[in-house]
Amino acid sequence: MAEVVRMPKMSDTMTEGVIAKWHKKVGDKVNTGDLIAEVETDKATMDFESFQEGTLLYIGAEEGSAVPVDSVIAVLGAPGEDYKSALEGAGNGAAAPAAESKPETTAPAEEAEEGGIDPESVGATVIRMPLLSDTMTEGVIAEWHKKVGDTVKSDDTLADVETDKATMEVTAYAEGTLLYVGVEKGQAAKVNDVIAIVGKEGTDVQALLKGGKKAASNPTEGNKAEESSATPAPAQAEAQTSTSSDARVKASPLAKKLAEEKGIDLSQVKGSAEGGRIVKKDVENFKPSAQPAAQAAAPQTDAAPAAKAEKTITIPQFIGEEKYTEKPVTQMRKAIARSLSDSLFTAPHIFVTMSIDMDSAIAARAKMNEYAPVKISFNDLVVKATAIALKQHPAINSSWLGDKIRVNEHVNIGVAVAVDEGLVVPVIKFADGKSLSHISLEVKDFAQKAKTKKLLPTDMQGSTFTISNLGMFGVDEFTAIINPPNAAILAVSGIQQVPVVKNGAIVPGNIMKVTLSGDHRVVDGAVVAAFLQTLKALLEEPVRLLV
């Protein structure tokens, strides 16, 4: 019996997952424990292993698509088994395969209302110009990949369509023979206009087009009309060249947009499409001639005798190009945005900064590294000192739970680690009881796992306090947003060499600034200041970390 496979909840904060990659395809045999997909959650990209056996009958989510937790993503069963009953019984609105959907239902209905024959009744499908962007009103057929008489499959690319934003592919959603092409290459069609008909070979398309308001009743007549309208093109082209306005120039929406961005006068661009229409490639290949500059220089030459005493400064024209790159928001970035927005706008933050003299810490670290099995970093010293200070100030090691405050007796310190997609916070558990070498090894291991996306959800759960260290970037000072459900986070800056006063004299010193962001619902300024005083004392006398 066919069984559905649902999107698992792979972390405590996961609401949806993105299928990063499928490792199986429809028809493949799947055994228990087989890796079938990689799923990108709000924490990391994780392997999804099957806990069922059978043949993969159905895939309900394409690579790169987001799927809510508990939604059907696949169906396993016996080879050739009907999986539709399993989908219907899943109860989550799982969609049937794309090949079985009938998007042409609306189109035939419209044709029927307009007086034509219902295409479905004769086994044909009307392909219309799709809405490929939110601002698109028409599209230009940049290229046809099929010609009349060719066999078309449901996933074949029929044509490339140039919109006001980009050139995109139009995929066939029907199978059969290409019976009719309503728009020639280089021509524009409004959204929802008929651009093609696919159906059984020999089907009379004239009956389908009869009475249609979205397409010409006869493609031959349409072509003749186009020819007649194109006859005075040379005269029109002349008129267009003589004016600097783009209003009369025949150009695609994308070509107009591109020309505006590049600062190009469309009246100077020669169109390569039918009827002299300017398309994207014409604008991209356009090179400004020296003629306008020469024309501009002529009046200056004529006027030179009258203005010998005045020197004219000519500002050269510079044509630049605005560029940007857009990329979809990753699941991790969504989670960070959601969590930190809730924190900043829900928890009233209090920020307290303190300067710490790191001279003794620098000397102690150098001595420790002569004997330590692993290199101790300044961050390791901060983690250890923070853990000890939290034991002495448990109010900082707390969480706001709405109707109560939880004071944690254990110390689990989250260490923020930057990765390409955002920020992850692996947790050093029971940090107060671990040696500096132990902490150093654990932090390095977590950092490596974070960069290779191998962190497990359990590695990032259970923090009672968080440290965000930007000292390695030479940051002078910054504030951090509290990482829920913690009541505080410590922002650690770089060690700066600055003049300091010691024993009444100004001498060089090594100062590190730390800023604690506290949830004012849980802690007050005096409590935060007392914690920072303890932290300062521990780092200024590092020997106290060892006792």
Image: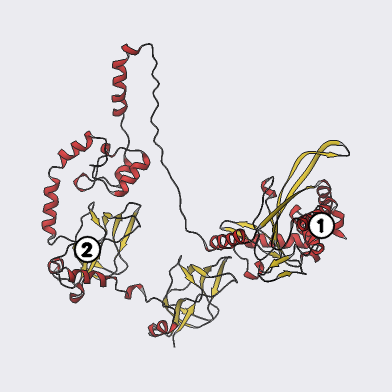
- Crowdedness of circle 1 by 10 Å Cα count: few (<14), some, many (20+)? few
Rendered-image quadrant of the C terminus: bottom right
Q: Quadrant of residue 218?
A: bottom left
Of badges 2 and 1, nearer the viewer stands 2
The residue at which mark 1 appears reads as 372
Colour convention: secondary structure
Going by the picture, which residue comes out furthest to the bottom?
1
Is 292 left or right of 406, judged from the image as shown? left
Is 184 left or right of 516, judged from the image as shown? left
Is 547 left or right of 431, judged from the image as shown? right
Question: Which element is circle 2 on?
Answer: strand
x%, y% of residue 443?
71, 60
x%, y% of residue 126?
22, 67
x%, y% of residue 384?
78, 59
At label 2, which amino acid type do we have? Ala
Is 148 left or right of 71, judged from the image as shown? left
Q: Is residue 170 above or below residue 325?
A: below
Rendered-image quadrant of the N terminus: bottom left
| Residue at the (31%, 22%) spot, across then down | 297
The residue at which mark 2 appears reads as 196
| Residue at the (76%, 52%) spot, across then down | 378
